Image (spheres, rainbow, N blue to C red):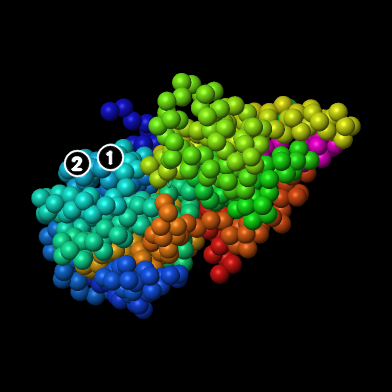
């Protein structure tokens, strides 16, 4: 296989561990802390998870650990969207497992959770793993979005694990996958299957976080990759001075990615979906807000700028959220008749005729491409695939129309040309930053330490992340601690609460204090490419979001 010089050098990078995990593995002991409990819906979660709720938080200390060397086989699954660092979680897990007992084996189930259901796996050994160390992507074993949620599936998992003598599963995923990991752990306990389940917090979206999970892995690398690209575009805009760039950024629901990129690059405008929802802002008012900012810059002779748009925005604009809900219900109810439509224009008419008057009015003002995108297939969770809705184009064209109107009214006299972009897949498989390489390796190593402590239903937790790696704290918390009850498909389900951008949190406050200046003036910051070798202040710093959150504690 041909490899780049960087890839070759990255193979040799030795990720940093928290100092306790640098000890001989047989001298690291799990220590039980205080009993934990879910922050919300305590009694209901306890009743649903009698064996795995209320367990103690775990940390590690020096001490003789005889059990860690017991021979075991472990299975690992990558679940959901790619996030930089997944290969290092597997590397850390592998290195710990072999350090504990060279006879241990690691089975990588292929293609996501469906791999275990289909008994499709790779035996991961040192040679096989070597070219994946410190690289991006999930291609080592592949990933997928199949959900493990039915008892029938759980029984197949148990059967496959027993067949291969696998006594522990590590599930690397986001909020949904870790929710399913908790349900699976409880099921295995209740049915005495003797199989442990440990989760690891993954998602570039950054929406799986709380006191014990300071950041999900991949967020650091993805936002740095997007920020580099945004900075390059800002510099081009500031050089050519002729385009307004509308940039949509990934992040299914939460706007953490857009906010972090705004903190890094200081664009003229960054929309935050959570704020749009809190202020019940309509699509028209968002368009007017952008158009007014464009007009104000035009007064200073600046007919260029950069607007950041979080991918999930449309679902937070009240009238569009309602429209999407109506379409979802309609498609669920009338899918046969809908599917019988011959082309997209018939589909649009079919839906339009069945909407409430209010939603029909909203639907009618949308460009036909956006209408088509709103009617595309749902994902396995029944969600609109927001990454395929061109909100960047929608806003650019609506702002253009608004500015034309302002021009006719004599309130605007600038020039307005746009370029649109979508940054998402560009960041999901980038070479992990040193931070993500270290963090992921530590999460994987730590996951094995939890397995060695005979724990199940825990998520691997590494905290104190704004300090150097040797000061990081390794441990674990029961996944149930992060759960609450939410309405899903018509009934109340235990799920991990998605962490959205907090409007009273330090990162948003910083942004809100500065955005007026950034909108009118040109305050662009150019972060440049991710650096892997060199001074620590350019190579090892994590996100502005985490730094601001930690400083506010
Ligand atoms: P996860 O939550 O599974 O980590 O995925 C997040 C994400 O990258 C979102 O930002 C994006 O909306 C989605 O995946 C796109 O995934 P897909 O390519 O499967 O549609």
Ligand 1 within 8 Å of disc 1? The answer is no
The percent position of residue 203, horizontal first and vertical second, equals 43, 49
Q: CA distance from mark 2 to mark 1?
A: 10 Å
Magenta span of residues: 293-308
The reply, left or right, for residue 225 in relation to residue 431 is right
> What residue is rendered at 19% in x and 71% in y?
65
Which residue in the structure is indicated by mark 2? 118
Q: Tell me which residue sits at (48%, 43%) in the image.
A: 329
Q: Residue at x 74, y 30 (%)?
A: 401
Residue 111 circle label: 1
From the viewer's side, name the closer residue of 20 and 226.
Answer: 226
**Front position in the image: 341 or 194:** 341
Residue labelled 2 has its Cβ within 8 Å of some atom of ligand 1: no
Classify mark 2: helix, strand or loop: loop
Q: Looking at the rendering, which quadrant does residue 55 occupy? A: bottom left
- Residue 533 appears in the rendering: no
Quadrant in which the C terminus is drawn: bottom right
Q: Would residue 423 be found to the left or right of residue 122 on screen?
A: right
Give yes or no for contact between labels 2 and 1 (Cβ–Cβ under 8 Å).
Answer: yes
Q: Nearer the viewer, mark 2 or mark 1?
A: 2
Q: Report the side of 66 relative to 402 (left or right).
A: left
């Amino acid at each position: 296989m041909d490899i780049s010089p960087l890839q070759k050098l990255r193979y040799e990078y030795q990720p940093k561990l928290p100092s306790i995990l640098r000890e001989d593995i047989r001298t690291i002991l799990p220590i039980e802390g205080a009993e934990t409990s879910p922050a919300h819906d305590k009694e209901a979660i306890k009743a649903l998870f009698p064996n795995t709720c209320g367990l103690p938080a775990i940390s590690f200390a020096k001490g003789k650990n005889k059990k860690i060397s017991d021979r075991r086989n472990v299975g690992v699954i990558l679940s959901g969207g790619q996030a930089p660092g997944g290969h290092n979680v597997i590397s850390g897990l592998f290195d710990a497992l072999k350090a504990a007992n060279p006879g241990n084996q690691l089975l990588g189930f292929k293609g996501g959770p469906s791999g275990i259901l289909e008994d499709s796996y790779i035996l991961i050994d040192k040679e096989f793993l070597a070219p994946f160390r410190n690289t991006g992507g999930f291609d080592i074993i592949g990933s997928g979005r199949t959900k493990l949620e039915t008892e029938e599936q759980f029984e197949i998992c148990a059967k496959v694990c027993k067949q291969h003598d696998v006594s522990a599963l590590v599930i690397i995923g986001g909020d949904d996958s870790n929710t399913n990991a908790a349900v699976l752990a409880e099921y295995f306990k209740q049915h005495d299957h003797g199989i442990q389940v440990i989760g690891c917090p993954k998602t570039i979206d950054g929406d799986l976080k709380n006191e014990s999970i300071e950041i999900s892995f991949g967020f650091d690398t993805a936002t740095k990759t997007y920020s580099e690209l945004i900075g390059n575009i800002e510099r081009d805009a500031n050089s050519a001075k002729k385009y307004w760039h509308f940039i949509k950024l990934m992040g299914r629901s939460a706007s953490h990615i857009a906010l972090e990129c705004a903190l890094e690059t200081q664009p003229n405008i960054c929309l935050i979906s959570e704020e749009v929802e809190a202020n019940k802002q309509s699509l028209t008012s968002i368009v007017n807000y952008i158009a007014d900012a464009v007009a104000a810059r035009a007064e200073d002779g600046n007919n260029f700028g950069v607007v950041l748009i979080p991918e999930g925005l449309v679902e937070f604009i009240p009238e569009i959220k309602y429209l999407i809900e109506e379409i979802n219900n309609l498609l669920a109810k009338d899918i046969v008749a809908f599917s019988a439509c011959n082309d997209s224009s018939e589909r649009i008419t079919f839906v339009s005729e069945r909407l409430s008057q209010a939603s029909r009015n909203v639907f009618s003002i949308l460009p036909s491409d956006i209408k088509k995108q709103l009617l595309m297939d749902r994902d396995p969770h029944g969600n609109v695939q927001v990454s395929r809705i061109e909100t960047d184009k929608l806003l650019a064209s609506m702002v253009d129309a608004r500015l034309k109107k302002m021009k006719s009214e004599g309130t605007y006299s600038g020039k307005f040309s746009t370029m649109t972009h979508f940054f998402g897949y560009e960041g999901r498989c980038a070479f992990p930053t040193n931070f993500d390489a270290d963090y992921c390796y530590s999460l994987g190593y730590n996951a094995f330490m939890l397995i060695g402590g005979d724990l199940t239903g825990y998520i691997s937790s590494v905290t104190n992340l704004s300090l150097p790696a040797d000061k990081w704290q390794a441990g674990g918390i029961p996944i149930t601690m992060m759960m609450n009850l939410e309405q899903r498909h018509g009934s109340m389900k235990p799920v991990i609460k998605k962490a959205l951008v907090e409007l009273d949190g330090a990162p948003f406050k910083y942004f809100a204090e500065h955005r007026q200046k950034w909108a009118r003036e040109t305050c662009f910051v150019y972060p440049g490419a991710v650096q892997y070798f060199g001074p620590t202040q350019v190579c090892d710093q994590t996100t502005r979001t985490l730094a601001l959150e930690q400083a506010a504690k």
